Amino acid sequence: MSVLWIVLALVALQRLGELVYAQRNTRRLLAEGGQEVGAGHYPFLVGLHAAWLAALAIFVPAETPPNWALLAVFVILQGLRLWVLASLGRYWTTRIITLPSAPLVRKGPYRLLRHPNYVVVAGEILVLPLAFGAWELALIFSAANALILTIRIRCEDQALAARRVDLDPLRSP
């Protein structure tokens, strides 16, 4: 089996595991009174990720040798992904679920960035195709991801705006 196929299989298994974890968290948050926002763009987000993996499987020849340095960057991104998941814990989902009674997470990478998960995802979508010489796929899917994330981040920021204002002593009444 080629390095490409091994990597794609591992990424697919990781994503499937994350979907199971996210669905469990989503059900729990909704049962606790959480509300989903931005559901209309969610199928496009899922479709983008599925198409990204499929495009790598279809358009990159299996025997393509990887750029090991870029593959190492991708592995580092997986560590950052786990840091994000661990920091959000029971609040991590693939959907935008807001629970008004829950505090905003301010630990881990959320101390440094407002949307660290999206930074990691953007890096993954760029780096993995580049690791196998598929700069065209890196460009196409990075552009599509940027478009979807523009919509998603706007939805998420609107959903969390009231809770963020409450945390900002300069903006509180």
Image: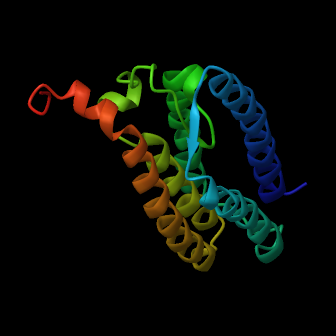
Between residues 132 and 44, which one lies in front from this camera angle? 44
Q: Is residue 87 left or right of residue 128?
A: left
Vertical relation: 119 (above or below) 111: below
Residue 2 locus on image (x, y percent): 85, 57
Please indicate, yes or no, whether residue 112 appears anywhere in the rendered image.
no
Between residues 168 and 35, which one lies in front from this camera angle? 35
Which residue is at a point 59% across and 70% down the rendered structure image?
141
Q: Is residue 22 left or right of residue 69?
A: right
Residue 10 locus on image (x, y percent): 78, 44
Which residue is at a point 40% across and 20% down the rendered structure image?
103
Furthest-right residue in this view: 1
Vertical relation: 126 (above or below) 77: below
Which residue is at a point 59% across and 24% down the rendered structure image?
33
Residue 162 locus on image (x, y percent): 31, 35
Between residues 153 and 68, which one lies in front from this camera angle? 153
Please indicate, yes or no, whether residue 31 appears anywhere in the rendered image.
yes
Quarter residue 19 falls in? top right
Quarter residue 102 falls in? top left
**How many numbered dots are placed on residues in this image?**
0
Which residue is at a point 39% across and 25% down the rendered structure image?
104
Quarter of the image with the N terminus in it: bottom right
Instruction: Indicate how the structure is coloured in the image.
Output: rainbow
Residue 23 locus on image (x, y percent): 74, 33
Furthest-bottom residue in this view: 136
Furthest-left residue in this view: 170
Vertical relation: 93 (above or below) 2: above
Quarter of the image with the C terminus in it: top left
